[in-house]
Amino acid sequence: MSKKLPYFRFHVAEWMNDDISAESYKIKGVFVDVCAFYWFKDCIIDMKTLKKRFKNCSSSIEALIEQNIIKHDENTDAVYILFLDSQYDMLSGKRKKLEDAGRKGGLASHK
């Protein structure tokens, strides 16, 4: 992920007005780190991996889950951050379309 989609969009208004804004600076910091890790892992991680990676932040992660800022599917152990999932799907689709168009253009020029 980090080379093909090296960044995600950060909307200041959402950061300042969404549920995360009411949390402590520690929880907000953990959330930003979790977002970066989640993005780096192509938006596919499980709770076991998250807790292992952030072993000193279990209470902050639990608070994020309790506030529905991070979603946890207990049946599959999957973790979801919905705004990043949405961006990943949109940007990956756009990137795929550009790759396909470039490939078609490249093939046409080699004929």
Image (cartoon, helix red, strand yellow):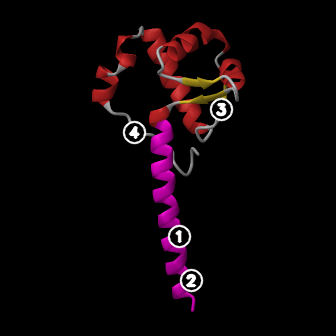
Q: Nearer the viewer, residue 45 or 67?
A: 67
Residue 56 image position (x, y, % from top left): 64, 10
In three-dimensional space, the C-alpha distance between marks 1 and 3, rounded to whole angstroms, equals 28 Å
Secondary structure category for the residue under label 4: loop
- Residue 7 seen in the figure: no
Of mark 1 and mark 4, the one earlier in the sequence is 4
> Is the residue marked by circle 3 packed among few (<14), some (14-19), or many (20+) residues within 10 Å?
some
Of mark 3 and mark 2, the one earlier in the sequence is 3
Residue lying at the far front in this picture: please name it.
75
10 in relation to 3, above or below = above
Q: Nearer the viewer, residue 24 or 6?
A: 24
Could you tell me the amino acid type at mark 4? Answer: Arg
Q: Circle 3 is placed at which residue position?
A: 45
Residue 33 image position (x, y, % from top left): 53, 24
Of mark 4 and mark 2, the one earlier in the sequence is 4
Q: Circle 2 is placed at which residue position?
A: 107
Secondary structure category for the residue under label 2: helix
Which dot marks residue 100? 1
Q: Are marks 1 and 4 in contact (CB under 8 Å)?
A: no
- Residue 15 seen in the figure: yes
Of mark 1 and mark 2, the one earlier in the sequence is 1
107 in relation to 63, above or below = below
In three-dimensional space, the C-alpha distance between marks 3 and 2, rounded to whole angstroms, equals 37 Å
23 in relation to 53, above or below = above
Could you tell me the amino acid type at mark 1? Answer: Asp
Question: Range of the magenta residues?
Answer: 84-111
